[in-house]
Image (cartoon, coloured by chain):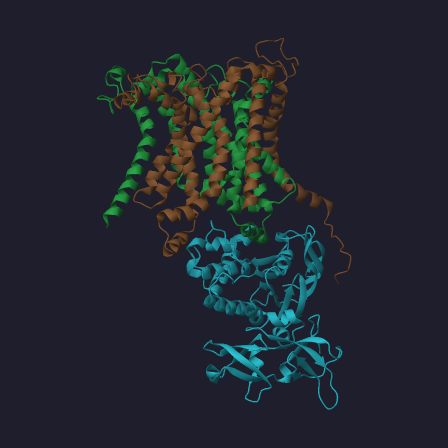
Amino acid sequence: MRPGKLLLIGAHRGAILVYVVFALFPLFWLLKVSVTPNDLLYSEGVRMWPSRTTFEHFNFVIAHSAFPTFFKNSLIVSGATAVVVTILASLSGYALSRFSFRAKYWIVALMLITQMFPLVMLVAPIFKMLSPLGLTNSLTGLVIVYSAFNVPFATFLMQSFFDGIPKDLEEAAMIDGATQFVAFRQIILPLTLPGIAATLGFVFTAAWSELLFALMLISGNDAATFPVGLLTFVSKFSVDFGQMMAAGVLALIPACLFFLLIQRYLVQGLTAGAVKG
Amino acid sequence: MMHQPIQKHRPPLRKRLADASEPYLYSAPALILIAAVMLVPLVVGISYAFRDIQLLNPFSGGFVGLDHFRALGQDQAFFGALRNTLWWTGASVFFQFTFGLILALLLDKPFYGRGLVQALVFLPWAVPSFLAGLNWAWLFNPVIGPLPHWFVALGLMDEPHNILSDPHLAMWGPIVANVWWGIPFFAITLLAALQAIPRDLYEAASIDGAGPVQRFLSITLPFLAPTIAITVLLRTVWISNFADLIVVMTNGGPADRTQIVASYIFTQAFRRLDFGYASAIALVLLALLLVYSMLIVLLRQTMLNKG
Amino acid sequence: MASIDIESVRKSYGPFPVLHGVDLTIRDGEFIVLVGPSGCGKSTLLRMIAGLEEVTSGDIRISGNRVNDLAPKDRDIAMVFQSYALYPHMSVADNMSYSLRLRKTAKEKIASAVGGAAAKLGLEPLLERRPKALSGGQRQRVAMGRAIVRKPKAFLFDEPLSNLDARLREQMRAEIKKLHADLKATSIYVTHDQIEAMTLADRIVAMHGGVVQQVGSPLELYDTPANLFVAGFIGSPGMNFLEGRYVVPGEGKGAGIRLSDGTVVPVASRTGIGPDATVTLGIRPEHVVISDTGMLEASVDLVEPTGFGIILHLSLHGLPFKIFTLDREALSAGPTVRVDFPQKYLHVFDDKGDRVG
């Protein structure tokens, strides 16, 4: 190999290494502090790994704090939102993909606009509207709000998955004796499963991460989701870094699990929808 | 044969109705939800902008006309937030895009372990935004974070202190967190676009005598241009509205130096519970974004006409 | 098995008409090929028979029953798609049995139907595979198998061979023909390939611009094309056309066509055209005779040996003109050749493009 080419390869690998380190270092530090015993936290400062590790922070967070409740609330809210949105988006995505109808253009435009305007605008009116319905400080209220916010993007995502399934297959099924609905259930749906999984995961993560509306709509610990709980914890016990970071590591788990599941499809599949949305 | 009047054939009414309504039935649940939770509040919110709505004041609720907007005209914090929004959005988009493009180009070359590397560098994208904010706030914290100590070692700082509490530097905190968090989005989108470029184009260009730089300029860039335009535009709007990192890391401080319009709206609604004023600011933000979008559309039109 | 009647069927997408009134009666057991260039409306017609497209006006009857408002599933027809449209998540056997399972056919019956079809098509070793693991030709067979297990009233084929390579296409063409001889099922086959049309059809329906141009047996279309479109579309290499004017018989001379250089090509006398009318003279490349005493001289542009025969590309009065011959001597043709047009092979079309006489 020519030395010039070797140098180029070296530079390429070096650059990639820089990116990997930049991407992972913050998460590594989170993990590091979460397993550092309190007495070493200040004395060992910038050391890359503590001389002694401990799970006491995790123990405390799981056994003696409200985090399990937050975790459970977030699971319920994110899970319910993901299911609701995926069902609605499958239907609307199917309509956009398979039918040409008069209002289609307007529906697409409406959904695009909801992606453009600042959601923070809606914080006050939504609070005012949900409050008399008893939907503030309630997980149901959050599920409704999050579902609406995520339906447009999920619709585009599902549409792109449906677009990837040739129309011939449905027609073949209809000629084979299926009604449109049976064709949808037996032919289209099984083929869209990866897309459905991706949409579920996407919406779940989005709902898991949402902060502003949760802060606004939820007061009190009982209905607090993970972000709300963590922020309250941070402002109350701002010196218990080990515990905060242990809680942070826990909050990371579902997101990372989902990420590992879909990262294979990321570049091929999701961007089609991502660019549209 | 061609001159016969065409008799429109009419299937039974019920079948026609069923056929025509099918797509609407499929999309109705989604549309109803969007209308109820996004469009109605949007209209309500616009009406709030002209009313005195304070959550804690039971006597509020009256129509105040343009009072909020007059107050806004005098509100130095708002104009500061406007400047900060430009700075925050511009710097975030610029660095996210630049580093995202470089990453996409690096990943477009096959090498051993590419799959794993791809998963690792895209990981920040999956981190919930509030956690990304907290994580970086801790990294900047001299008590437990390494960054201030490294800055001192590099001679950038005299003694380790938190840049998030330094009025001149504080904005860099959320921007760095945002860049870290947003690089994967650009990289993923651009990588997909890169991989959609037919490989034989590069081969043809090589045979025609184009070097790597010429190949990049004459093939890669033109092919990426539409994707770049769309993602940068959408991302600009999105980031200018993205208040999570700022709310988590600095809450707009110190001395409003990191307050952007979106976080200012949230502060008015959430901390002061002044829904009327918050809605007035939101309306101005909406108008600004509309103007921005119109400008982009106009720009595109003129560019298309030239082309 | 069934007959299919198409009565003044029209189709338009909004204000854009794609079919301008088609009338066609397909007899029980007949193999009909719809042929024409892309966009001629042949696929639309097929899809309307299948129930995949709405009929704008007119009636479609299968075995005498009007089916306009019947869903595809209730028409009892089978269709082979260009893309094969095999269900990717089902095995070959499941693909083939899907229609029977939807009809809740008894298990044993399904097994024997699938087994029978698989045996006919040589698919037995592949029954448990997924479509992804099959070659193009095998997929094509599965698509055929899926159609024949049902014993439907009619088979519809939408360009089923166009994704195969040349050799496989030839082979499948023969198999489809054998299958039809075996099953005697009413079949409608859409293609843009005139060779497929010629070899497979009992009757060909040539279409162009949403209008049926001619219906007839393959040889009828070949020997007596109804108009310039059919004449040019059927046959390869395509028919040669020369512009000229009709010379009425008289003064001891027969009828003829006067070409631009003044040469009069004698033709059989025709009725229905007046003296000096503008006409187009057509002759197929294989019917042109090369002869030293030929009445026309043409310069040789190109000699194309195909192995089987030789195609000579000529210029006649500055216009391209082709000859197909089996005679190897043509390989050494000089810079010019003289040609003759045997009268019985000449076609004459009037200024509207319709056949005369």
How many numbered discs, if any?
Answer: 0
Q: Is residue C184 above or below residue C264?
A: above
- Front residue of this view, candidates B157 and B238: B157
- The residue furthest left is A51
In the rendered image, the quadrant that contains the N terminus of chain B is: bottom right
Q: Which chain is green?
A: A
Q: Is residue A210 above or below residue C181?
A: above
Chain C: colour as depicted: cyan
Q: Residue at x 75, y 90 (%)?
A: C251
Q: Position of residue C307 (x, y in %)?
A: 45, 77
Q: Is residue A195 left or right of residue B61?
A: left
Q: Position of residue C169 (x, y in %)?
A: 49, 66
Q: Residue at x 56, y 22 (%)?
A: B282
Q: Which chain is brown?
A: B
- The residue furthest front is B306
Q: Position of residue C171 (x, y in %)?
A: 48, 68
Q: Is residue A145 left or right of residue B157?
A: right
Whether residue C26 is visible, yes or no, is: no
